[in-house]
C-alpha cells in the first residue's frame, strides 16, 4: 500500500509538470485536478484511489473486454462509497438518480396533481426542459418512459434511457473526475448539454452523465490572432453550456454576431458546434464549426488540453464537425465574431385550401427555381410543408426568409420574381417583409419557438447539392420527390442555405455541406398507440421508402448528424462524406478504449444499445456488437 501511493505521488508530480504547459488560448482556464488529487488521495480508501486518476497515473491499464458496459447488479458496478467519493471530490456536484420530470404525474413520493397539470401544459416548450439534468427533447429516443400521461401514457414511471448519476460540472476538474471514473470503472458515460439532439445522444440507461449546461462564462476578445488559421479579429471565448439566446445577446452588446442556430435554446457551443451546425448566417460565413478558433477539452485519458491550430491540431480538426461525445468533452470554445448587421426578414404562408392541389404544387415548383440564386445572395430560408391527412390540405409556411445584411429593397428585389410567378398562378398571400436594425432584433422577431418532445415522430435529413438544381430536369425531379413525401404524409422542414466556408477551414465538417443548396428534413409519424413492432416497421419503411428516394436523387451527398434518424444507413458516409476514414483513425487515437459513445457517432459501429422494446432508443444496456 505504502509503495503504491508513493508511486502515485511520483506519477502525480511528473504529470503536474506535463500539464502545466502554457495554453495558447487567451485567458486560458486551468484544471485543479492534480492539486485536488494530491490533497485527497491519502484519505481515500486504498481500493478507491485508482478510480479517480487520469490514465497516465494509473498503475494498471483500464478498460475491459467485457461485452457490455458495467451496469447495476454487475460485480464491477461501483460501490455506494465509490459514488459518494466522486460526489465529495467534485464538491457535492453529483446528482444521484435525478427524478424524471414526469414523476410528479405518477403515484409515489413525488406525485403532485397540480404541478403535473402545469408541466403538461408547457411540456412541448424547450424552456420547460433545458435546465433539467436528464431530460432529452426526444422521448422517442429515451424510450417513452415516465411521460406526463396526458402527453403520452407511459403506464408507470421508470427511468428508461435516463442516466442514473449526473455530474453537474462547472469546472474542468469535475469533467476530468467524471471521465476518469467512467473509464476506470467501465460504467457507461454520456455527455449532456441541453438535450436538443434529434437522435437523443445525451441520454443512456443507468449511465454516469457529465452535464455541461452550466459552463456559462462569456468573454469577449477584441483581437484574437491565429496566423495559421489566417484569423485576426474579434472573438468570444465561451463556456460550452452557453445557449443561442445568451450568446446572441452578449454579441449584440458588442455590436457583433456569432454563427449559431436559429432555435433559441440550442446549446450552440456544445453538440451544435462540434457537429457542424447550420445557421441563419451560414450562407455568408459557413457552418458553426467553421468559426472555431480553439477548444479546451478533457480527453478520454483524463487530461485537460487545448485543441487549436498549434496545440493538438488533429483533435482540433476532428472536433470541428466530427460530432460531440466522441473525442473528448469540451469545456470552452473560442469562436469568431462578425460585425452586427441590419437584416430583413419575411414570413408568409399559403395553403392548397382555396386554390387546389395543382396550383399549390405549381407554386412550390416555381420556388425551386430560386433556391440557387437566393443562397448565392447570402440569404437563408426556413420553410415547412405540412400535409393534413384529415382535410387533404397542404400548407406552405415561410418562417422566415432571412436576409442578413440586406436592405428592404434588396430583399424585395430578390423575392419579387418568385412572388410574381405565384401571383400569376393565382396564389395570393400577404408577405410581411420587415427591416430590422440588427441581426439580433430580426432573429428575435422572426423565428418560432419550435415544439419539442414529440411522441410519435422521427426525422430524417438530406442535403440536396447544387447538382440537384442545375437543370430544369433536375429541379423537376427534386420537386416531384418533395411532393411525393407530402403526399405520403411526411412533415417537411427545409433550409435553403449554403455553407461554403469563406475562410476555407480544413476541418471535419461533412463535405456534403459545401455544395448544399437545400437542407431537407422529413418526419415519419405513427399512431400514438402503435405497438413496438408496428413502429419499427413504419420506421424501417420510412428509411427504405421516402428517405431512400431522397438519397437516390442526391448520390454522394449526405445528411446532418444532429438532425437525423438513428436508422440512417451507412451513417459514416452520410454524416461525414470523405472525412470519415480520417475521423475513424482519430477516434482510435484519442479514445482507443471507447470511453465516449453516442449513437451514430464516429466509431460507434462496434456498439449497440440493446433496448428492452427492440426500438432504436437508449432504454437498454450499451454492448459490443457481436
Ligand atoms: C428546437 C431545435 C432547433 C434547432 N435548430 C438548429 C439549427 O438552427 N441549426 C442546427 O444546426 N441545428 C439545430 N438543431 C439541432 C441541434 O444542433 C442539435 O440538437 C445539437 O445536437 C444540439 O446540441 P446541444 O449540445 O444543445 O444538445 P445535446 O443533445 O445536449 O448534445 C448533443 C450531442 O453533443 C454532445 N455534447 C454536447 N456538449 C458537449 C461537449 N461540451 N463536449 C462533448 N460533447 C458534447 C452530447 O453528448 C450529444 O452527443 C435544433 C434542434 C432543436 C431541438
Ligand atoms: C401552476 O401554474 C399557475 C400559473 O402558471 C401558478 O399560479 C400555480 O402556482 C402553479 N401551480 C403549481 C402547483 O405549480
Ligand atoms: C411499467 O410499464 C411498462 C409498460 O406498460 C411495463 O412493461 C413494465 O413492466 C412496468 N414496470 C414496472 C416497474 O411496473
Ligand atoms: C447545477 O449547477 C448550477 C450552477 O452551480 C446550479 O445553478 C444548478 O442549480 C445546479 N442544478 C442542479 C439540478 O443541481
Ligand atoms: C389533394 O391531395 C390530397 C393528398 O394527395 C388529397 O387527399 C386531397 O383530396 C386532394 N385535394 C383535392 C381538392 O383534390
Ligand atoms: C426603394 O425602392 C423604392 C422604389 O423602387 C425607391 O423609391 C426607394 O428610394 C428605395 N429606397 C431605398 C432606401 O433605396
Ligand atoms: C410584420 O412583422 C413585424 C416583425 O415581426 C411585426 O412587428 C409587425 O406587426 C408585422 N406586421 C403585420 C401587419 O403583421
Ligand atoms: C401523434 O401524436 C399527436 C399528439 O402528440 C397527435 O395529435 C397525432 O394525431 C399523432 N399522430 C398520429 C398519426 O397518431
Ligand atoms: C389504436 O387506436 C385506434 C383508434 O382508436 C384503433 O383503431 C387501433 O386498433 C389501436 N391500435 C392498437 C394497437 O391498440
Image: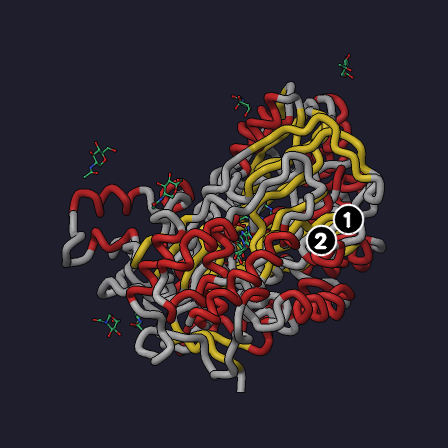
Instruction: Pinpoint residue 567: horizontal percent, then vertical percent.
Output: 55, 71
Question: Mark 2 near ligand 1 (CB under 8 Å)?
Answer: no
Of 481 and 62, nearer the camera is 62
**Secondary structure at numbered mark 1:** loop
Instruction: Pinpoint residue 99: horizontal percent, then vertical percent.
Output: 28, 55
Q: Report ligand 6 position as a quadrant.
A: top right
Do the residues bearing badges 2 and 1 touch, measured as CB atoms within 8 Å? yes
Residue 316 numbered mark, or none: 2
Q: Determine which residue is flagged by label 1.
A: 309
| Residue drawn at the location 49% of the way across and 53% of the way down | 175
| Residue drawn at the location 38% of the way across and 68% of the way down | 46
Of 490 and 476, nearer the camera is 490
Residue 622 visible in this rendered orientation of the protein: yes
Q: Give the spatial CA distance, label 2 vs label 1.
A: 7 Å
Up the image or down, 570 lies above or below 317; here it is below
**Secondary structure at numbered mark 2:** helix
- The answer to which of marks 2 and 1 sits earlier in the sequence is 1
Residue 563 visible in this rendered orientation of the protein: no
Res 435 → quadrant: top right
| Residue drawn at the location 49% of the way across and 45% of the way down | 171
Instruction: Pinpoint residue 42: horizontal percent, then vertical percent.
Output: 40, 59
Amino acid at each position: 500500500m505504502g509503495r503504491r501511493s508513493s508511486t502515485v505521488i511520483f506519477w502525480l508530480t511528473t504529470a503536474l509538470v506535463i500539464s502545466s504547459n502554457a495554453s495558447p488560448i487567451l485567458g486560458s482556464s486551468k484544471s485543479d485536478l492534480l492539486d485536488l488529487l494530491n490533497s485527497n488521495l491519502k484519505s481515500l480508501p486504498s481500493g478507491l484511489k485508482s478510480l479517480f486518476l487520469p490514465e497516465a497515473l494509473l498503475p494498471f491499464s483500464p478498460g475491459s473486454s467485457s461485452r457490455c458496459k458495467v451496469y447495476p447488479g454487475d460485480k464491477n458496478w461501483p460501490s455506494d462509497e465509490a459514488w459518494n467519493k466522486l460526489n465529495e471530490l467534485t464538491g457535492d456536484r453529483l446528482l444521484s438518480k435525478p427524478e424524471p420530470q414526469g414523476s410528479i404525474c405518477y403515484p409515489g413520493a413525488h406525485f403532485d396533481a397540480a404541478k403535473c397539470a402545469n408541466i403538461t401544459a408547457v411540456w412541448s416548450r424547450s424552456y420547460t426542459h433545458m435546465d433539467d439534468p436528464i431530460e432529452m427533447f426526444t422521448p422517442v429516443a429515451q424510450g417513452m418512459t415516465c411521460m406526463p400521461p396526458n402527453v403520452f401514457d407511459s403506464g408507470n414511471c421508470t427511468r428508461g434511457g435516463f442516466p442514473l448519476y449526473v455530474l453537474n460540472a462547472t469546472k474542468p476538474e469535475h469533467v476530468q473526475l467524471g471521465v476518469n471514473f467512467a473509464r476506470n470503472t467501465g460504467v457507461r458515460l454520456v455527455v449532456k448539454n441541453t438535450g436538443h439532439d434529434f437522435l437523443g445522444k445525451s441520454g443512456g440507461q443507468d449511465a454516469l452523465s457529465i452535464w455541461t449546461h452550466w459552463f456559462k462564462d462569456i468573454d469577449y476578445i477584441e483581437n484574437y490572432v491565429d496566423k495559421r488559421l489566417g484569423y485576426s479579429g474579434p472573438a468570444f471565448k465561451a463556456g460550452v453550456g452557453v445557449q443561442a439566446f445568451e450568446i446572441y445577446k452578449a454579441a449584440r452588446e458588442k455590436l457583433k454576431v456569432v454563427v449559431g442556430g436559429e432555435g433559441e435554446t440550442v446549446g450552440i457551443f456544445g453538440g451544435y458546434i462540434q457537429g457542424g451546425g447550420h445557421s441563419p448566417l451560414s450562407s455568408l460565413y459557413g457552418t458553426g464549426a467553421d468559426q472555431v478558433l480553439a477548444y479546451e477539452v478533457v480527453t478520454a485519458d483524463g487530461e485537460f488540453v487545448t485543441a487549436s491550430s498549434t496545440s493538438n491540431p488533429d483533435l482540433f480538426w476532428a472536433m470541428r464537425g466530427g460530432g460531440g461525445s466522441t473525442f473528448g468533452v469540451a469545456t470552452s470554445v473560442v469562436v469568431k465574431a462578425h460585425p452586427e448587421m441590419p437584416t430583413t426578414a419575411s414570413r408568409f404562408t399559403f395553403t392548397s385550401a382555396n386554390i387546389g392541389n395543382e396550383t399549390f404544387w405549381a407554386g412550390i415548383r416555381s420556388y425551386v427555381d430560386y433556391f440557387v440564386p437566393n443562397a448565392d445572395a447570402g440569404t437563408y430560408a426556413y420553410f415547412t410543408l405540412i400535409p393534413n391527412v384529415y382535410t387533404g390540405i397542404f400548407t406552405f409556411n415561410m418562417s422566415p426568409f432571412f436576409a442578413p445584411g440586406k436592405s428592404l429593397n434588396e430583399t424585395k428585389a430578390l423575392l419579387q420574381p418568385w412572388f410574381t410567378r405565384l401571383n400569376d398562378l393565382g396564389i395570393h398571400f400577404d408577405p410581411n417583409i420587415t427591416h430590422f436594425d440588427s441581426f439580433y432584433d430580426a432573429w428575435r422577431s422572426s423565428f418560432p419557438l419550435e415544439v419539442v418532445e414529440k411522441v410519435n415522430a422521427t426525422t430524417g435529413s438530406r442535403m440536396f447539392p447544387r447538382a440537384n438544381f442545375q437543370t430544369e430536369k433536375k429541379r423537376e425531379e427534386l420537386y416531384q420527390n418533395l411532393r411525393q413525401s407530402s403526399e405520403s404524409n411526411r412533415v417537411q422542414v427545409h433550409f435553403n442555405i449554403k455553407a461554403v466556408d469563406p475562410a476555407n477551414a480544413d476541418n471535419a465538417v461533412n463535405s456534403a455541406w459545401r455544395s448544399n443548396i437545400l437542407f431537407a428534413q422529413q418526419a415519419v409519424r405513427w399512431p400514438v398507440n402503435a405497438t413496438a413492432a408496428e413502429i419499427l416497421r413504419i420506421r424501417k419503411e420510412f428509411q427504405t421508402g421516402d428517405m431512400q428516394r431522397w438519397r437516390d436523387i442526391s448520390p454522394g451527398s449526405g445528411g446532418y448528424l444532429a438532425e437525423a434518424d438513428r436508422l440512417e444507413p451507412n451513417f459514416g458516409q452520410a454524416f461525414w462524406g470523405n472525412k470519415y476514414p480520417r475521423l475513424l483513425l482519430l477516434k482510435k487515437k484519442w479514445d482507443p478504449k471507447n470511453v465516449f459513445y453516442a449513437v451514430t457517432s464516429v466509431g460507434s459501429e462496434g456498439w449497440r444499445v440493446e433496448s428492452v422494446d427492440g426500438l432504436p432508443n437508449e432504454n437498454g444496456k450499451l454492448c459490443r456488437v457481436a
